[in-house]
Image (cartoon, grey):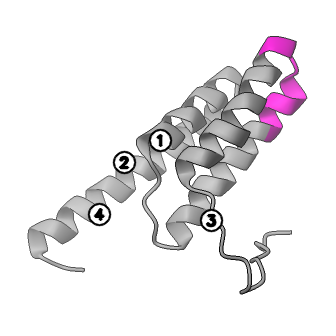
């Protein structure tokens, strides 16, 4: 738990954020909403948040569509506390990035 399994170095295929959204996250989110399956909705919500966090941990920039999906899923799943925490963290990160740019820091 908490670790990401990396593929063998012989594996050269990479799934882009767009592919992850289109082929995995969005279809499962839509199915959970259509089925009114709150457990599956919370799972997809958690998976989306963890995916976004892992991208940032690897110094990759999550696409806006992924951020919007996370916000929508948290809202739809009724996770107001987690949503508030997520939005606060995003604002803090943007403030830090803006200040770094003003000071010309990496």
Give the residue pinned by disc 3. 14
Q: Residues within 10 Å of mark 3 (few under 14, many from 20)?
A: few
| Disc on res. 87 | 1
Real-space Cα separation, disc 1 to disc 2, in angstroms = 6 Å
Q: Which mark is residue 58?
A: none
Q: Main secondary structure of the magenta part?
A: helix
Structural distance between the alpha carbons of marks 4 and 1: 14 Å
**Residue 9 vertical placement versus 86 (above, below):** below
> Which picture quadrant has residue 54?
bottom right
Total labels: the figure holds 4
Q: Are marks 4 and 2 in contact (CB under 8 Å)?
A: no
SS under mark 4: helix
Label 4 neighbour load within 10 Å: few <14, some 14-19, many 20+: few
**Upstream in sequence: badge 3 or badge 4:** 3
Residue marked by disc 4: 96
Is residue 35 inside the magenta stretch? yes
Q: Are marks 4 and 1 in contact (CB under 8 Å)?
A: no
Q: Is residue 30 left or right of residue 83?
A: right
Q: Are marks 1 and 2 in contact (CB under 8 Å)?
A: yes
Q: Nearer the viewer, mark 3 or mark 1?
A: 3
Going from the N terminus, do you reach mark 2 or mark 3 first?
3
Q: Position of residue 4 (x, y in %)?
A: 76, 72
- Magenta residues span 34-43
The answer to which of marks 4 and 1 sits earlier in the sequence is 1
Q: Are marks 3 and 1 in contact (CB under 8 Å)?
A: no
Residue 99, percent across and down? 19, 65
């Amino acid at each position: 738990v908490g670790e990401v399994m990396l593929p063998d170095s012989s594996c050269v295929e990479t799934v882009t954020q767009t592919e992850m959204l289109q082929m995995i996250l969005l279809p499962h989110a839509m199915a959970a909403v259509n089925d009114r399956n709150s457990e599956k909705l919370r799972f997809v919500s958690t998976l989306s948040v963890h995916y976004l966090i892992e991208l940032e941990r690897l110094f990759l920039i999550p696409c806006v569509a992924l951020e919007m999906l996370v916000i929508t899923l948290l809202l739809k799943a009724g996770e107001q506390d987690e949503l508030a925490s997520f939005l606060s963290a995003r604002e803090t990160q943007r403030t830090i990035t803006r200040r770094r740019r003003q000071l010309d820091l990496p």
